[in-house]
Image (cartoon, rainbow, N blue to C red):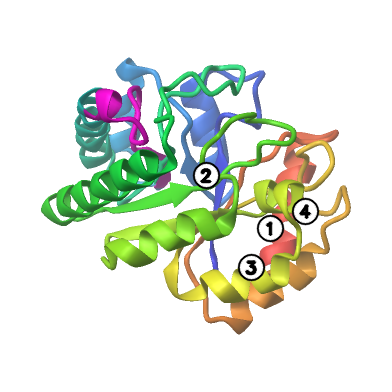
Amino acid sequence: MFQLSICAGTVLQDLPFLERVRAIARAGFAVDLWGWEDDALDEIAADPDITIGAIPGWRQGSMVHPDGVEAFFEGVRCNLEVAGRLGCRNLAIATGEISAEGKIVHAIAEHPATMWITAYKCCCRLAELAEQHDVIFNLEVMNTKVDHAGYPLPLVEDGLRLVEQVDSPRMKLLLDVYHAQVEEGNLTELIRQAASSLGYVHVADVPGRHEPGTGEINYPHIAQALRDVGYAGYVGMEAFPKDDDCQAMERFRTTFS
C-alpha cells in the first residue's frame, strides 16, 4: 500500500500556511512542503497528527558546477536541520537554485564531463550526510519542454545513472510522473527501469499539471505499474487542482488507494 502525501504549495492556497498544513493532515494525508514559514515549524513538529512526507533538501548553489558546490551544501545543511525538527526522513534534491517562476538560475558547467563528475561527487557527499542524519535524499529529474527550460537532468535515465553509480540506500530517485510524461513518455517502461532505485513518486496530470484523472495519463494503470514493481513508498500529489481542491485530493486518494 502506498503512503499518500499532498504538496502544501499547490492546494488550499486560500488558507494561511499553518492552517493549510493542518487541513491536509486532517484529510488523512502526509504533507509535502516546497517551503515553510519559520515561525510555524515548532507547531508543526509538536502536532502528532501532522506527518511531513518530504521537504526540499537544497536552497541555493549548484551541484553541476564546481563553483556552486559549497553554497549548495550550505543550503543542504540548513534544510537537514529543518528535517530533523519536523521528523522528516525524505528530502528532494534538484541540481541547484530554481526561481519561484521555475527558471533555472544556477550555474551549469559548460563541459559535460565536468558537469557529470561534479554531480556524482555531490551525490556521494549527499549519501554520506544522509547516513549521518538518518534520512534519504531523492534526486529529481524535471522536464525542460514546459516548466524548467535548461534543467540539466531532464531524463529519468539521467537521474537513474547517477543514483546507480552512487550505490547507496540513502540516495534514491524521485520519479515525477508529470515531468516524465512531458519530457519523454513511455511511463510504464520508465517505472520498470527505475524500480530498484525509486525513493519517492510525484504525480500530476498532463496537460495543466492538475490532479490525476484530469488529463491524458492513465493513472490507474500507473498505480498498478508501481504495485507490480513492488513500490510501496510515498506517492505525493504535486498538482494544481483543476476545480475544487477537496475534490482533487479525494480523486487522488481514490486512484492510489
At mark 3, the secondary structure is helix
Q: In whole angstroms, how far apart are the C-alphas of marks 2 and 3? A: 15 Å
Disc 4 versus disc 3: nearer the observer: 3
User: Is tag 2's residue or tag 3's residue first in the polypeptide sequence?
Assistant: 2
Residue 1 shows in the view:
no
Q: Residue beneath label 3, please?
A: 190
In the rendered image, which residue does mark 4 sit on? 251
Q: Amino acid at mark 1?
A: Arg
Location of residue 162 in the rendering, given as x and y in whole percent from the top left corner: 39, 57
| Image position of 147 with respect to 233: above or below | above
Residue 214 placement, left or right of 33: right
Residue nearest the viewer, comparing 46 with 142:
142
| Side (left or right) of 221 relative to 8 | right
How far is mark 4 from mark 3, CA to CA?
A: 24 Å
Query: Is 115 part of what is drawn in magenta?
Result: no
Which label's residue is closer to the chain start, 2 or 4? 2
Q: Which residue is mark 2?
A: 153
Measured as percent of width and height from the top left, residue 19 is found at 52, 25
What's the magenta region? 52-69
